[in-house]
Image (spheres, rainbow, N blue to C red):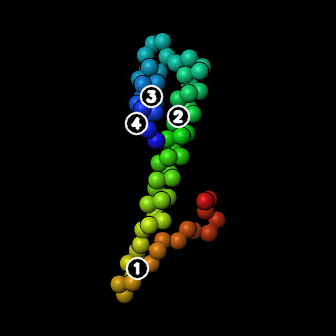
Amino acid sequence: MEQSRIDRISELTRKSRTPEGLTEEEQAERAALRQEYIRSVLGDLECQLENTYVMDEAGNQQKLKKREGEKA
């Protein structure tokens, strides 16, 4: 996610704490940006976990596996 979009989330959050608050459009924009940010963070985490290995007692490296029934 671009830094400018993260800065916009912060800007809207600061404005929401003022007495004037946010307009309906700004609330919708903030919600959409937050969802985009969450998807970005989860995607980065999933990518990192796909490249993570665990070493067992014998010193063998095993790739992490998804649990059954987990979302993709």
- Figure quadrant of the C terminus: bottom right
Please, what secondary structure does the residue beneath circle 4 have? helix
Q: Which residue is mark 3?
A: 8
Question: Dot 2: few (<14), some (14–19), or many (≥20) neighbours within 10 Å?
Answer: some
- Sequence-earlier tag: 4 or 3: 4
30 horizontally vs 54: left or right: right
Q: Nearer the viewer, residue 38 or 5?
A: 5
> Callout 3, which amino acid?
Arg
Q: In whole angstroms, how far apart are the C-alphas of marks 2 and 4?
A: 12 Å
Q: In whole angstroms, how far apart are the C-alphas of marks 4 and 3?
A: 9 Å
Question: Dot 3: few (<14), some (14–19), or many (≥20) neighbours within 10 Å?
Answer: some
19 horizontally vs 32: left or right: left
Single out the mark in the foreground, 1 or 4.
Answer: 4
- Sequence-earlier tag: 1 or 4: 4
Q: Residue at x 54, y 40 (%)?
A: 36
Please, what secondary structure does the residue beneath circle 3 have? helix
The answer to whether residue 31 is above or below residue 55 is above
Q: In whole angstroms, how far apart are the C-alphas of marks 1 and 4?
A: 36 Å
Please, what secondary structure does the residue beneath circle 2 have? helix
Q: In whole angstroms, how far apart are the C-alphas of marks 3 and 2?
A: 8 Å
- Sequence-earlier tag: 1 or 3: 3
> Callout 2, which amino acid?
Leu
Instruction: Tell me residue 34's x, y (percent).
Output: 52, 36
Question: Dot 4: few (<14), some (14–19), or many (≥20) neighbours within 10 Å?
Answer: few
Q: Which mark is residue 61?
A: 1
Instruction: Tell me residue 25's x, y (percent).
Output: 59, 21
> Callout 1, which amino acid?
Gln
Are discs 1 and 3 less than 8 Å apart at CB?
no
Single out the mark in the foreground, 4 or 3.
Answer: 4
